[in-house]
Amino acid sequence: MSLQLNDNSCIAVIGGGPSGSFFTYFAYDFAKRFDLELTIDIYEAKDFSKIGAGGCNHCGGIISESLVQMLAADGIVIPSNIIRSGINTYTLHVEQGQSVIKTPSNEQRIASVFRGCGPKGCLDTSQRSFDDFLLMLCKEKGANIVYEKITNAERTDDGIFIESKTFVKKKYDLVVGAAGLNSKTFEMFASICPELVPPKTTRTYINEFFLKKDIVEIFFSNSMHVFLLDLPNITFGALIPKENYVTLVLLGQDIDKEIVKKFVESEQVKGCFPEGLNLEEAAHCKCYPYINVKAAKNAFNDRVVLIGDSASSKLYKNGIGAAYITGRAAAKAAVFEGISKESFKKSYYKTCQDLNLDNQVGKFIFFVTKIIQKSKFLKRGLLQTVINEQKDASENRIMSSILWDTFTGSAGYRNIFVRFLNPKLLFKFFWNIIKTNIYIKKYERKSSWN
Ligand SMILES: Cc1cc2nc3c(=O)[nH]c(=O)nc-3n(C[C@H](O)[C@H](O)[C@H](O)COP(=O)(O)OP(=O)(O)OC[C@H]3O[C@@H](n4cnc5c(N)ncnc54)[C@H](O)[C@@H]3O)c2cc1C
């Protein structure tokens, strides 16, 4: 049976984070081409105008260049009151030193945003959240935003009923699961999407350091600080400036309090802040959110499709970009192909498969990064390669652009991997490993004689 959206079809989007908003935005756009009138209700459990956890979708808040560009091509420009800082350099920190990596192209700029109205304790309520901005775009297109948590879903012959604690059941032709990694919501989806296997997740860490605006400007400027330190469980640590806050993000395997402590107390991290600053006291808002590390399986069925983190994301990076990709692809499939399991399999599934395949390469890249992270010899070579590239404007900055794209999530992992295999780059990298380590050995020998 081919299920199709018709004039006045009703769609429920469960979750008003980026994937739910992107689905809605593009569903209206695509439907317009068919002169199709859709009713879309977005259900969101949080109020993004709230300060702290109640209004926040825990995230580093980096909007990658690729996403900024894709949004601009769709006519979506992120307003300046949403952007907390424009990031135009990365500062790479390893135990052996640091180097600033400039944006590979002057046109490419990254934005840092808050997903909620602001961290716990924040007094400035004039700030707007990125998620709220996207929701309001959907409202302008005609969506109804309902601030309710959906607690139940039931399938009937001709639709799906959903309900919350406060309203009676309402029937929809299509239900879109954009609920992130909420385990309770996955249980609910099991009844309408029985073959669904939820994504695998791991625990990460975020905290917001509250500092004065001029301190952030002096110590961080427009640079995101990235750390490749030899510390257990941490694949990636970053400090992201956001006007009068600096966000700390730790990604890796089951991050806990002890791991966070080791990271924050490392010389390299403390060195980024004013001397003597009590980082424990400055850390106003802390959380240990989950991140998607393995995609869901069978994330669609007749009249049901899951998108964003609930289905497939990008490993460790650019999850908002992946929410855009899956949200748009699901909207395209629903409007142009239909809303049956077969239609989603034919069209939407390819997008998820492509993300999943790229993540496999990403896993290999992070495996190699881990080896580099653990070896001072390799790290010296890496740092020297970046320093040499950054010194010389005429240099083809391949390593810098690879690191830039790995940290920002701006390019696909397959693309990054192919660039890493460049023979000239590999020669430069290995030459710098040999050169820097011979130099260090000589220096150490000389010092021990003295
Ligand atoms: C530590 C960390 C740092 C990250 N940093 C970045 C970064 O810098 N850049 C980046 O691009 N990505 C980053 N990500 C990933 C990014 O946050 C996610 O990939 C992205 O938010 C996914 O969007 P989504 O809409 O699928 O899900 P979410 O953003 O999780 O949104 C889901 C929404 O559904 C709502 N919801 C859930 N259940 C229900 C229900 N039953 N009824 C109603 N509403 C419901 C929730 O309240 C929520 O608003 C990071 C993730 C983590 C964990």
Image (cartoon, rainbow, N blue to C red):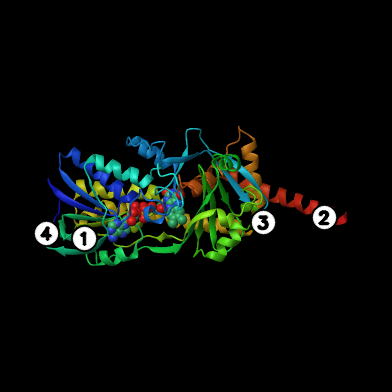
Q: Determine the secondary structure under disc 4.
A: loop
User: Where's residue 214, x and y in %?
Assistant: 57, 39
Q: Earlier in the sequence, mark 2 or mark 1?
A: 1
Which residue type carries mark 2? Arg
Image quadrant holding the N terminus, namely bottom left
Q: Which mark is residue 376?
A: 3
Which residue is label 2 attached to?
A: 445
Count of picture labels: 4
Instruction: Quote the CA–CA distance across marks 2 and 4.
Output: 80 Å
**Residue at screen point 58% across, 62% down:** 261
Q: Residues within 10 Å of mark 4 (few under 14, many from 20)?
A: few
In the rendered view, tell whether residue 208 sits above or below residue 204: above
Q: Secondary structure at mark 3?
A: helix
Q: Is residue 390 visible?
A: yes
Labels 3, 4: front one: 4
Q: Quadrant of ligand 1?
A: bottom left
Among the two numbered marks 1 and 3 on one chain, the one whose residue lies closer to the N terminus: 1
| Residue at (27% x, 53% y) in the render | 147
